[in-house]
Structures are given as structure tokens and as C-alpha cells.
Amino acid sequence: MIPRYSRKEMAQIWAPETRFKIWFEIEAHATDRLAQLGIVPKAAAKKIWAMAKNATFDVARIDEIEAVTKHDVIAFLTHLAEIVGPEARFVHQGMTSSDVLDTCLNVQLTRAADLLMADLDEVLAALKKRAFEHKMTPTIGRSHGIHAEPTTFGVKLAYAYAEFARAKTRLKAAREDVATCAISGAVGTFANIDPSVEVYVAKKLGLKPEPVSTQVIPRDRHAMFFATLSVIASSVERLATEIRHLQRTEVLEAEEYFAPGQKGSSAMPHKRNPVLTENLTGLARLVRSAAIPAMENVALWHERDISHSSVERGIGPDATVHLDFALKRLAGVIDKLLVYPENMKRNLDRLGGLIHSQRILLALTQKGMSREESYAAVQRCAMPVWRGEGQFLDLLKADKEVAAKLSPRELEKLFDLGYHTKHVNTIFKRVFGKA
């Protein structure tokens, strides 16, 4: 992660100071429970808290020790002993490094998930507000990038709302799945530490005990977590891509807000580029890059290896920080999005009425023509319009085969734009409920 795409609250979760604070809490809570069991002196457990609870762990000192020990947890425990004194010998009783590392990672991921869910709430709120604002604003729907049939801009935003609502549901489930704690000792058998210690520490940290840790928390949990972030990133990109296409000069139905004093190009003063949504597209790629390594981390050797460690030190901060930044940016883009209904109307009329072709097709079948005959007749009238050779309605009226089935009045009624928006309320009720 780099500062340009980092927000302070999310970045702080991954700061070394935060990590060491969590490590201390894991160790201290475990020592408390061991004291309750009579395994370590209660006075020692109290002193550990008293001496280190408010301590500022010296990151440089821990790094200095690790340069010799080549082991990060031992380096931390050595520094903790420098702070606490002789009672530090009761810390880490019966525990192994993974108990600390894995439990800490899951604390960090759950905290990150909480921030991301708050971000999703902002995106959802912005989408809902703008969707209702443009609930009945007609615009052209496109398939393959080509004009298809009318829809509304509100419906476009409603689909995005529904997608991000699903994203929040998935993230909530992924958070629940990854919120486990392992304090089970070497190879996960609890041989040197009572299982009640794990239960105690888990409760203190807002986690659940891992049913079978094998010394490490199973990485299928983390694979699902990062896969969920990747799907959310893909939803970000989908909406960002839609906005980028709508901002193209030839379309210009919607546009990112362009602030006073903002510059679009170092060479061309007239430019107003979709830089925010282009940035979101790039950030989505970064977040998705975490998915495959997370899945490859699932297959560890026997009860434990550390091939996953270097991966998670990278993808944990990077994926959560980048997605946090992207969701916050997306909420702002939607909230300030410039929408141009007049350009939407212009584009609706651009193909001379061809957007109503399906209605003509269906009407002819209702009048007794076969579907094949109806399709051929409608297409025969449509193709000249593509070449700029008249209006669709005029060509239909002039076609003998079509005119034999549909009167001019009937044809005109089939060009009603409101026909395509008659079920918008139904769609909105499905997406937003009765509100």
C-alpha cells in the first residue's frame, strides 16, 4: 500500500504499533487465564498488564532484536521482557508463534471488515439517493454497447444498489468466518496449554475458538475473505466502467464532478477526464490480485508451514486498504455525479425510433404473422434507418406488409416511451422495499 491510496483509519490497523499491541493483548489475556488456572502467579499476570498495557512498543528495538533472532515473535517477547521484567517468563506459556500471529491477523481482518462494511453503507446510501432522484429519468439501455431498448437511469443505479447490498451480505459472512482464535500450542493439540485459555482469549478479542487449528488457523477462511473482497472490487469496477462509458464525449449522459480549478490534461486545457473511475478500475485490479495467492495459501504442509506468511503480510494490508479507499471514492463519485437527462433524451432519439422494434415485432405476431415473417418485416424497415435513410415509423407505415396488419394509429401507439418504464416501481420495490 502507498499513502496516495490509503485512508488513515484502515492503514492504522496494519501499522506495526497496532500489531504489537494486539500481540501483547493476546499474550496478556492468555496469561490471565493461566493465572486463574493456577499455572502462573496471579501477581505476575497483574504486573504484566500494569507494566505493558500502556507501553509504547519500540518498533526499531524489536527490529534490532529480530535482526539477530531471525524470528519476529521471539523478538517481540524479548522486548516485552525488557519492559515487564522477570515476570515476563510467564508469558507465552504453552503457546506457539502461530497462536499469536494467526489470532492477530484475524483481529486485523475483522476490524478491516468493519470499516469496509461502513464504506459499503456510504456507497449504498449514495446509490439509493441518486436512484430515487432519477427513478423515472428515461435513458437508453445498451447491449454489446449498442442501443437496445429504453430503461431509466434510476434502474441503472438500482442494479448497482442491489449488487452492493449483496456485497455487504457476503462481507458480513466472510467476517464471521474469519473471526476465529487459535491458542492451541504446537501442532494444535493443547498438550501444553488448556483449551479454556483459547476460549478465554477468543471472548476477550471478540472472536470464536477455532475448532481444529493444527497449529495454524485453516486458510480456507482467509481464501474466502479475500475472494469476497475481490468480488466487491469487481462490483466497483463494473459501476466505474459504466460511468466511464457514459462520460465519453459521444455519449455524455453522466459525468464525474469537475471541481473548480481542476485540470484534465497537461497539454489540452479543454479536457474533463473520468480520472476517478479510471482510478477505481485500477484499484479493483489490485484488490483482485489478492484472491489467487490467498487460495494458494490453503495448501500448507502437514500441520503447519509458513509459505502463507509472506503472502499475507502483503495482501492483508494491500487488499483492505485499497478497497477501503476505492469504496470511499466510489461513494463520492456517485454522490456528486453530474447527470444529463437532456443528453439521454437526445441519445434515445438518435436511431430514429429503432428502439421500439421489439414492440412492432410482437404486435405483428399478435395480428397473425409468424415470428419469422414479423422479424423479417421489421428488420427490412429498420436497416435503412441505420444508414440514415428515414425514420423508422415512416418506413413502417409505408411498408405494405406491415400496413396490412397495423394501422398508422396503431403503429404510433407502439412508439410510447412510457411503455418501457411501467414496471420501474416493481423493480424499485424489489430492490429497496416499500420505502
Image: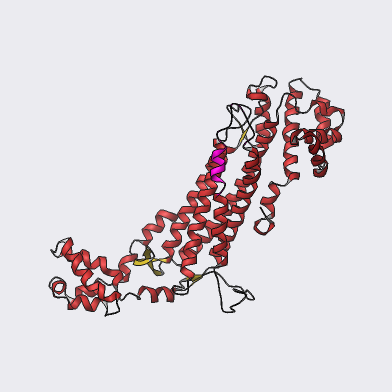
Q: Residue at x 58, y 63 (%)?
A: 332
Callout count: 0
Q: Nearer the viewer, residue 169 or 316?
A: 316
| Viewer can see residue 372 | yes
| Viewer can see residue 176 | no
Q: Residue at x 22, y 77 (%)?
A: 395
- Mostly what secondary structure, the magenta segment? loop
Place of residue 35 in the rendered image (x, y in percent of width and height, measured from the top left): 77, 24
Q: How is the image coloured?
A: secondary structure
Horizontal side, residue 128 vs residue 109: left or right: left
* Residue 231 belongs to magenta span: no
Q: Nearer the viewer, residue 64 or 113?
A: 64
Place of residue 263 in the rendered image (x, y in percent of width and height, measured from the top left): 62, 74
Place of residue 421 in the rendered image (x, y in percent of width and height, measured from the top left): 34, 65
* Residue 294 belongs to magenta span: yes
Answer with the quarter of the image where residue 198 lies. Answer: top right
Horizontal side, residue 180 vs residue 248: left or right: right
Place of residue 321 in the rendered image (x, y in percent of width and height, measured from the top left): 63, 51
The magenta span reads: 289-307
Q: Nearer the viewer, residue 33 or 237?
A: 237
